[in-house]
Image (cartoon, rainbow, N blue to C red):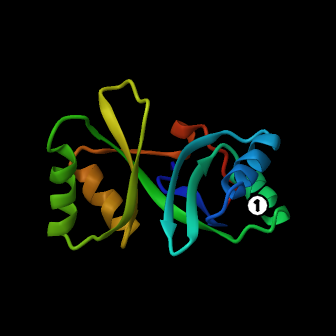
Amino acid sequence: MKKLKLKQISIFLENAPGRLYEATEALGAAGLNLRSLSISDISGFGVLRILVSDVATARRVIMEKQFPARVDEVVAAEIVDTPGSLAKVLKLLMENKVNVDYMYALAGTSSGRAVMVFCFSDNDLAIRLLQENGIRILDAESFGILESPA
């Protein structure tokens, strides 16, 4: 059975020149590909959220660089890329009392679909609801992500 929850690494970076460079340079030097990323600012710190080609190696690199980080489970869903599609998905979740803690989109898909990465209050329920409504959930293999056995 395919694992439908992806391992996302959240790295906490001081919001200062060069910190983002240091993190991405270290990952690149280790031969890691960033499959997706989002960065946001919270009170002088940035939170870099990444899906990376090899989760175990990325964790090792981040620990060696002593960046505070954690691994979270997220869900990647492929939705129709037309006006109102995201709102339709969010309504389904809202009606079933599933909260979206945060989300971000992936650019560059050519399938006519948008890929949204979600962190839900209940990932398992969200996956079930989305699948029951014909929404494709992408697994680690779809992203070219190597995850260590859980």
Q: Within 10 angstroms of label 1, few (less than 14), some, or many (20 or more) residues?
A: some
Residue 140 position within the rendered picture, expressed as x and y whole percent measured from the top left: 55, 45
Which residue type carries mark 1?
Ile
Q: Is residue 95 left or right of residue 6?
A: left
Q: Residue at x 74, y 60 (%)?
A: 59
Most distant residue in the right direction: 64
Name the foreground residue: 92 vs 127: 92
- Whether 62 is drawn above or below 121: the answer is above
Q: Is residue 38 left or right of residue 62?
A: left
Residue 35 position within the rendered picture, expressed as x and y whole percent measured from the top left: 57, 41
How many numbered badges does the structure rendering display? Answer: 1
- Whether 41 is drawn above or below 25: the answer is below
Residue 87 position within the rendered picture, expressed as x and y whole percent measured from the top left: 17, 52
Q: Pointer 1: what residue? A: 62
Q: Quadrant of residue 68?
A: bottom right
Q: Residue at x 47, y 59 (%)?
A: 74
Image quarter of the C terminus: bottom right
Q: Is residue 27 left or right of residue 117?
A: right
Looking at the rendered structure, the secondary structure element under dot 1 is: helix
Q: Residue at x 56, y 72 (%)?
A: 44
- Whether 85 is drawn above or below 9: the answer is above
Name the foreground residue: 48 vs 81: 48
Q: Residue at x 31, y 33 (%)?
A: 113
Most distant residue in the top direction: 110
Q: Quadrant of residue 58?
A: bottom right
